[in-house]
Image (cartoon, helix red, strand yellow):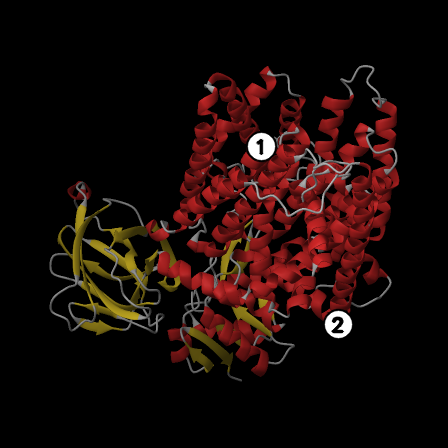
């Protein structure tokens, strides 16, 4: 037992190193518990727990309890017509309903409706009830079209799946109530003047997320706690072992080690899969489990070696000096930083996981092709050489590195693709706090600045939390690798690692090569960052050791050369087929500068305040002549310059865009904000009396937690409901497709115009390809990168044009050898009622709002 205790102690020493030499003079006495550390940790933990008890103030929209088709007019609400809707609140604690309406303008007197109308809402449990359980009145806009109107309701304290009936009346003016003139919502229907009709108004229910809901989430989370082990093995262990064997690990603190381990691991997996794909070595679940077991075994062997080495060093020191070590004060500092980072991580992870509690699958259209590429990797055991039959695009047109990581996670856990993507995506989103900490510490050399930067990223800035709403998992993963790659390359450029220079070359090449495979745009970000660093740090050095500009440039080129060698087969094809065509395209002055820039992406939640802090941090950094402030400024300018090549008539305008740059600004914003708070903390320590230092520190901790709580309340509901395409009933229907529809069939789904002139699926039918292997029309939006995009767009538009004409739709299906149509629970332009009434289509599936039809011969 004593040996095990000593081993654990030495492992902790490795995680929380006290100094670079690790040569401690330790006596065989019971460990001394630092009560101040216990009190500090207890205070932080107490406020964290208290903040969770306040989540009852958060309102969630429930996508499962909604009917969001708004294109039809259900009826006109006026002084002699009242409209009702029966529905079910899937979640407990109903607290609001959103409806869609269009104010009516009186014929011949457009100015008569200049005053807001008033709509009365009565809430019943059923249409037959006489007395309402709640009644309210709300003003409506005087003009507009399809306006969402949210009506707050006192928490009903209802159980799950409670039935309700809402009745809308008005005695002033009139409004058209929007919805769908057919039975699209199977759990209720519309009543006009008390008479049921076959229609559904558009509505969305909301509920209180309170302590009871949190407890239920925690109970479900306990059953998934085992996922910690495959996540650690995949995301941390490979990088940690490489850092340890290289001898570089002890140069960094706990937060830096964690971020570096994650960045190296995320870069290593795509590179290895590239070469196994080239060598035709197939990955399987068993092979991944074997490698995981090998890495865990290697970890224990290494830890045992560390234990034996340190035990011997400790015994030698005990013989020469029998006194206690004098590093107690240092240990306080080194222990506080890891504990604080861990608490920030746990708090951020809680926010990110609660965000997606109502999602059946990851949100929006990007998630669909991420899942599809992952499916192909899982089935092939390698990178796809073709995306047929789903999309006609060149394999190197898109970066597959992230998807190899998702595939490894799915192999390790045996989870479905959609669940693997959802869980891993939120974990990666949370791990951004470590990457920002590393980046901040690398530039400012301040752990405290890194801590505050992590808080800003985790709780205050809208990005990267909002990445979940878009499914921007590839760029997110690239931004986790970027700080690790830069930190290692910086060692190379600063000439600080002459003894381990070969390891630095290897690790910097692995992270850079892996970043290239994960996201093409983020590798441009890294290139601009290295160029900015060279301009600001290297060119202005004067006579300092290791400052040879030629040497730095040479070492950087060597690193780049090795990185290119690691991905050369993929790199050469990408440059030829993807990058060079973009460089040949000349920009046009008709394109406006920053045309795709939107301030809301960086000002939502508490983003405005973080911008102010970042701006002040930048100014203060310049006043203090901190080179990193100029570095960040030059970096951002370079990125926006490239993003606006089109407006400048410069070739290569498609390399990156303003949106991709804008949504990564949370990194410099967090760094500069963390630096400013660190500087305020340092300056105030010199101003306030000595006896007030401790209360001052406590105040900083409390304010930080309250600020994090305030930001969490806004981030936790930041997902845009429009981007949630699927429902749980879609997953059951896709299971039916897998069992009943031939693999070679292409299934028509509800199309809508997504962006860039492309069409995407508007409901859960989007997930048919990733989860069942059947092709769809429209396919995942990556088809826009291929030569066949024109035909897909034409066909998708025809589906929209023929959606109200079953005969024309059947003719289109027959001409193009299409035999199935899918209408998801969210719905779209295709009408299940029209197809049901038509003699040209047969109902194959009808359950919980999902319809599958086949064409008759």
Rendered location of residue 532, percent (x, y): 71, 27
Q: Nearer the viewer, residue 821 or 52?
A: 52
Q: Residues within 10 Å of mark 2 (few under 14, many from 20)?
A: few
Name the disc covering residue 420, or none. none
Quick one: SS at disc 1?
Answer: helix
From this viewpoint, is residue 388 visible? no
Position of residue 95 in the picture relative to residue 60 (left or right): left
Q: Nearer the viewer, residue 34 or 707?
A: 34
Left/right of residue 170 with respect to residue 324 in the rendered view:
left
Decide: few, some or many residues near mark 1? Use Cα within 10 Å; few <14, some 14-19, many ≥20.
Answer: many
| Proximity of marks 2 and 1: CB atoms separated by less than 8 Å | no
Between the C-alphas of marks 2 and 1, the distance is: 43 Å
| Element under disc 2 | helix
Residue marked by disc 2: 286
Q: From this viewpoint, is residue 513 visible?
A: yes
Q: Residue at x 63, y 64 (%)?
A: 372
Q: Position of residue 370 (x, y in %)?
A: 62, 59
Which residue is label 1 attached to?
A: 448
| Between 594 and 210, the one nearer to me in the picture | 210
Q: Is residue 856 above or below residue 571?
A: below
Please give the name of the residue rendered at 49% of the width and 30% of the height, measured from the top-left corner: 611
Residue 622 in picture, x, y percent from top left: 60, 18
Q: Is residue 214 left or right of residue 377?
A: left
Q: Please tell me which residue lies in front, 28 or 822.
A: 28
Instruction: Give the mark toward the camera: 2 or 1.
Output: 1
* Quarter in which the N terminus is drawn: bottom right
Residue 422 falls in which quadrant of the image? bottom right
Q: Earlier in the sequence, mark 2 or mark 1?
A: 2
Residue 214, x across and y down, in percent: 41, 58
Q: Is residue 44 above or below residue 761?
A: above
């Amino acid at each position: 037992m004593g040996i095990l205790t000593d081993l654990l102690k030495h492992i902790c020493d490795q995680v929380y190193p006290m100094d670079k030499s690790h040569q401690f003079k330790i006596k065989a006495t019971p460990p001394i518990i630092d009560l101040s550390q216990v009190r500090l940790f207890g205070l932080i933990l107490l406020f964290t727990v208290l903040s969770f008890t306040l989540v009852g103030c958060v309102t969630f929209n429930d996508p499962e309890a909604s009917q969001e088709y708004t294109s039809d007019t259900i009826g006109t609400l006026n002084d002699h017509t009242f409209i009702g809707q029966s529905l079910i609140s899937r979640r407990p604690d109903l607290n609001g309903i959103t409806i869609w309406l269009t104010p009516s303008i009186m014929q011949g007197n457009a100015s008569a409706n200049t005053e807001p109308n008033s709509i009365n809402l009565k809430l019943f449990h059923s249409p037959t009830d006489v007395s309402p359980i709640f009644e309210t009145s709300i003003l409506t806009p005087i003009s507009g079209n399809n306006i969402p109107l949210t009506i707050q309701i006192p928490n009903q304290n209802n159980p799950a799946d409670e039935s309700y009936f809402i009745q809308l009346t008005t005695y002033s003016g009139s409004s058209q109530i929007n919805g769908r003139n057919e039975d699209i919502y199977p759990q209720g229907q519309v009543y006009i003047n008390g008479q049921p009709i076959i229609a559904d108004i558009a509505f969305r229910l909301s509920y209180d997320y309170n302590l009871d809901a949190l407890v239920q989430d925690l109970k479900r989370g306990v059953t998934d706690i085992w996922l910690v082990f495959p996540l650690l093995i995949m995301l941390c262990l490979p990088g940690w072992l490489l850092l340890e064997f290289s001898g570089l690990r002890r140069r960094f603190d706990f937060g830096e080690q964690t971020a570096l381990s994650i960045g190296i691991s995320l870069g290593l997996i795509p590179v290895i899969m590239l070469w196994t794909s080239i060598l035709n070595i197939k990955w399987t679940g068993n092979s991944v489990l074997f490698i995981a077991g090998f890495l865990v075994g290697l970890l224990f062997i290494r830890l045992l070696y560390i234990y034996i080495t340190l035990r011997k060093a400790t015994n030698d020191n005990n013989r020469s000096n029998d006194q206690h070590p004098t590093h107690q004060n240092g240990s306080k500092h080194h222990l506080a930083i890891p504990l604080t980072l861990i608490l920030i991580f746990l708090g951020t992870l809680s926010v990110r996981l609660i965000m997606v509690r109502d999602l059946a699958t990851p949100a929006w259209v990007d998630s669909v092709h991420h899942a599809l590429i992952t499916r192909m990797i899982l089935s092939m055991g390698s990178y796809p050489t073709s995306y047929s039959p789903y999309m006609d695009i060149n394999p190197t047109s898109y970066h597959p590195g992230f998807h190899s990581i998702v595939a490894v996670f799915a192999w390790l856990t045996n989870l479905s693709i959609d669940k693997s993507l959802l869980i891993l995506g939120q974990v990666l989103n949370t791990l951004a706090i470590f990457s920002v900490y590393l980046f901040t510490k690398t530039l400012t050399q301040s752990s405290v600045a890194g801590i505050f930067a992590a808080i800003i990223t985790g709780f205050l800035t809208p990005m990267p939390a909002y990445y979940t709403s878009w499914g921007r998992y590839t760029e997110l993963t690239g931004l986790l690798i970027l700080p690790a790659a830069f930190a290692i390359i910086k060692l190379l450029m600063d000439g600080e690692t002459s003894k381990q220079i070969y390891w630095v070359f290897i690790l910097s090449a692995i992270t850079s090569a892996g970043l290239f495979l994960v996201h093409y745009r983020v590798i441009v970000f890294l290139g601009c960052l290295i160029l900015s660093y060279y301009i600001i740090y290297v060119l202005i050095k004067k006579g300092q050791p290791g400052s040879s500009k030629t040497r730095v440039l040479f070492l950087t080129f060597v690193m780049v050369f090795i990185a290119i060698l690691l991905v050369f087969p993929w790199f050469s094809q990408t440059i030829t087929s993807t990058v060079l065509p973009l460089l040949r395209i000349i920009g046009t002055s008709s394109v406006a500068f920053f045309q795709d820039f939107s301030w809301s992406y960086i000002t939502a939640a508490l983003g405005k305040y973080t911008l102010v802090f970042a701006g002040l941090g930048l100014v203060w950094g310049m006043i203090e002549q901190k080179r990193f402030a100029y570095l960040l400024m030059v970096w951002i300018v370079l990125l926006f310059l490239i993003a606006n090549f089109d407006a400048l008539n410069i070739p290569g305008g498609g390399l990156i865009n303003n949106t991709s740059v804008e949504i990564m600004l949370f990194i410099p914003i967090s760094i500069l904000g963390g630096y400013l708070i660190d500087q305020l903390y340092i300056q105030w320590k010199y101003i306030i009396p000595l006896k007030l230092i401790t209360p001052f520190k406590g105040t900083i901790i409390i304010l930080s937690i309250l600020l994090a709580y305030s930001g969490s309340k806004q981030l936790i509901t930041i997902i845009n409901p429009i981007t949630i395409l699927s429902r749980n009933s879609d997953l059951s229907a896709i299971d039916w497709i897998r069992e009943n529809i031939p693999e070679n069939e292409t299934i028509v789904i509800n199309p809508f115009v997504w962006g860039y002139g492309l069409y995407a699926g508007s409901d859960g039918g989007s997930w048919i390809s990733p989860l069942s292997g059947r092709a769809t029309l429209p396919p995942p939006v990556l088809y826009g990168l291929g030569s066949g995009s024109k035909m897909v767009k034409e066909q998708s538009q025809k589906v929209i044009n023929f959606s109200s004409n079953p005969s024309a739709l059947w003719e289109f299906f027959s001409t193009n050898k299409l035999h199935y149509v899918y209408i998801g629970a969210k719905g779209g332009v295709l009408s299940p009622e029209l197809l049901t009434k038509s003699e040209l289509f047969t109902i194959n599936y009808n359950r919980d709002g999902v319809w599958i039809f086949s064409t008759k011969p």
